[in-house]
Amino acid sequence: MAPQLDIYFGDNLGIMRGLPEASFDLIYIDPPFNTGKTQARSRIQTIRDPEGDRNGFGGQRYRTVKIGTQAFADNFDDFLAFLEPRLEEAVRLLRPEGSFFLHLDYREVHYAKVLLDGLFGRDSFMNEIIWAYDYGARSKRKWPAKHDNILWYAKNPDRYTFRFEDMDRIPYMAPGLVTPEKADRGKTPTDVWWHTIVPTNGRERTGYPTQKPLGILNRIIRIHSNPGDTVLDFFAGSGTTGEAAIRNGRNAVLIDNNPEAMEVMARRLAFAAPRFHGYEPSPAQMDAGTATDCPARAPVAKAIWRL
Ligand SMILES: C[S@@+](CC[C@H](N)C(=O)[O-])C[C@H]1O[C@@H](n2cnc3c(N)ncnc32)[C@H](O)[C@@H]1O
């Protein structure tokens, strides 16, 4: 049976709350950082000063001094407060032997890990995968940050899907130190994944600003789910998870609240005849998606793994 793709338009929290418990084998999310409002909350102290600008206790004059601005902390609190109820839903929606992947930037991943340890239990934490790439400007004042972090939690740390035999192979760093047969075969990857970003003018590119490489999602889906399983991405963006899932024979449910994401997914994933919920793609979008020269119709690009 052909894999099924469902795409929902709207805020993910309400949609997730309407989905039945334990209905997903694998959940991957790549949430936007800082969805909360920027609140530059200034902390103020009053100091007694005869030249001060305000009257205070006992008729004394006081001046106010700004002792700091907590813009970052406030943003961050908003982000975690936004994420937490959605993560709680993810735990509810995951099957007892399912896996959860959270893809984040290095600045907030540690706070999110503490949150996830609380929701899944520390024993459920399996790996922190480092996706390393090499692109863009290089700082001369500190080590250039060229990686993203992906946290893997298994709902049951004793029983989960890990299809080791399906793992792609990568070249040895020093092939001269192993037999030619081993060098030809390559080795299995570690928790550091070197992979190019989505090339700006490559066939995979959809134009969606935060699009992640298909190679990363292919690896997660092939190793952490079985054919016929169902995958959820509730921050779907351009639909990379959906494309990887369908092309690898898994069902997928994608959610996003941005109409531009819907437009991109309608074109990119038209080949899988998705069912849309709360959104009506135009016939032109669906035609664009089924045109033979559309990147989404092309075979999955061979991932460029480097070491
Ligand atoms: C970083 S992007 C995901 C990119 C995706 N991994 C890809 O490869 O294209 C995050 C997405 O989350 C969506 N989003 C943000 N808040 C949301 C919400 N409350 N409900 C549903 N989607 C949301 C944004 O519209 C955006 O498309």
Image (cartoon, grey):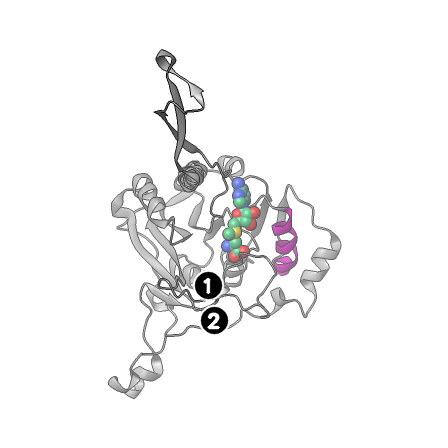
- Amino acid beneath label 1: Asn
**Relative vertical location of residue 287 with respect to residue 52 in this rendering, above or below:** below
Quarter holding residue 15:
top right
Residue 295 is a magenta residue: no
Report x, y in % for residue 116: 34, 43
Report x, y in % for residue 46: 37, 25
Nearer the observer, 108 or 17 = 108
Nearer the observer, 99 or 152 = 152
Can residue 252 be seen at all in this image of the molecule?
Answer: no
Residue that label 2 marks: 303
Q: Is mark 1 within 8 Å of ligand 1?
A: no
Label at residue 191: none
Quadrant where the C terminus sits is bottom left
Label at residue 218: 1
The kind of secondary structure the magenta stretch mainly shows is helix
Residue 264 is a magenta residue: yes
Contact, mark 2 vs mark 1 (Cβ under 8 Å): yes
